[in-house]
Amino acid sequence: MKVKSFLMIVTLILVSGCSSKFAYKNLDWLAHWYIDDYILLTEEQRVVVDQKIAIWLAWHQQEELPRYLADLNKLTDDIDDQQLSFAKLDAHQDTIKQHWARMKAKLVPDLVLMAPLLDSQQIAYLFEKLDKRNAEERKEIDETLSLSPKQQQDEVVKKYKKSITRWLGDLTSEQKILAANISGELQDNDALWLDYRQRYQAELKTVFEQPDRGDSFSERLFQLMMEPDVFRSDELNKINAENAVNFKKILLAINNTATVQQREKLITEINKFARDAEALIQD
């Protein structure tokens, strides 16, 4: 399983409909569910994967969850004290990046060691599934682009209004206007992200198709998994940077218009995850 996939499963728990505590305690099953979509493991391989997942989860529960809890508490303190600022948002973003860096440092060496266990049929199946997923995403992008500019804008606004409402509750008239302006502030980069993933996956496929499974294979695979960002285009990096700045401005604008009830709801929603993290740490 790719390291980013494991992290994605962990983080997606935060936006899933089920209890975050329940989902985390069943993360081994969720990981297998994700792996089975892309690789058909043998029984021997499954034993190895099970052992590694158990080690990863124990590490995450013991070392990472306390950090998550501290970060969640810091975030709620900033919201409660009305101390959110551009610099504060930057700091919270940097903290998330640090979580991601530690996750890679922990998982990637193990994934590189397990990679030679895959045979040629499993590798072919993996990249067939990735190609299929990319084709489906390309179709979705093309369908979106076939809509009129107004329809595209409406879809973006609808998505962000739903997300904001999920955390704040009903929006004020001013906040609805801010949400409606989001589509004009953020540049669409879905096609560029897809191009990036396809370039990265093509390079991974080239590495896996080499018959050598020695040091050169491990070194190149390690480099690819630790530094996938080098395959991003300059245009994608530029748009990502501009979108990040504009999105933070939008968040601050919405935060500055939040009512007492909305602020309380936001803190309550975040505290649900903090309580779950605390319970899991003590479990």
Image (cartoon, rainbow, N blue to C red):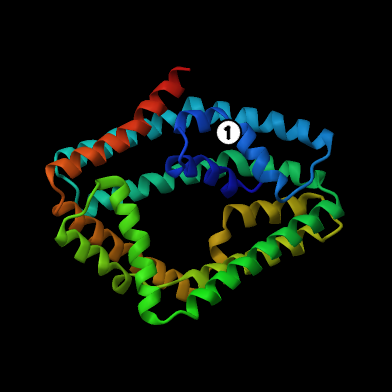
267 in relation to 196, above or below: above
Mark 1 residue crowding within 10 angstroms, few (<14) / some (14–19) / many (20+): some
Say which quarter of the image contains residue 26: top right
240 in relation to 272, above or below: below
Q: Position of residue 280 (x, y in %)?
A: 46, 23
User: Is 80 on the left or on the right of 128, as rendered?
Assistant: left
User: Is 105 on the left or on the right of 241, as rendered?
Assistant: right
At 30% from the left and 32% from the top, the residue drawn is: 271
Residue type highlighted by circle 1: Leu
Q: Position of residue 42 (x, y in %)?
A: 83, 39
At 45% from the left and 32% from the top, the residue drawn is: 19
At 49% from the left and 69% from the top, the residue drawn is: 190
User: Is 91 on the left or on the right of 280, as rendered?
Assistant: left
Say which quarter of the image contains residue 224: bottom right
Q: Position of residue 43 (x, y in %)?
A: 83, 34
Residue lying at the far top of the rendered structure: 283
Q: Secondary structure at mark 1?
A: helix
**Which residue position holds label 1?**
27
135 in relation to 10, above or below: below
Relative to the observer, which residue lies in front, 198 or 188? Answer: 188
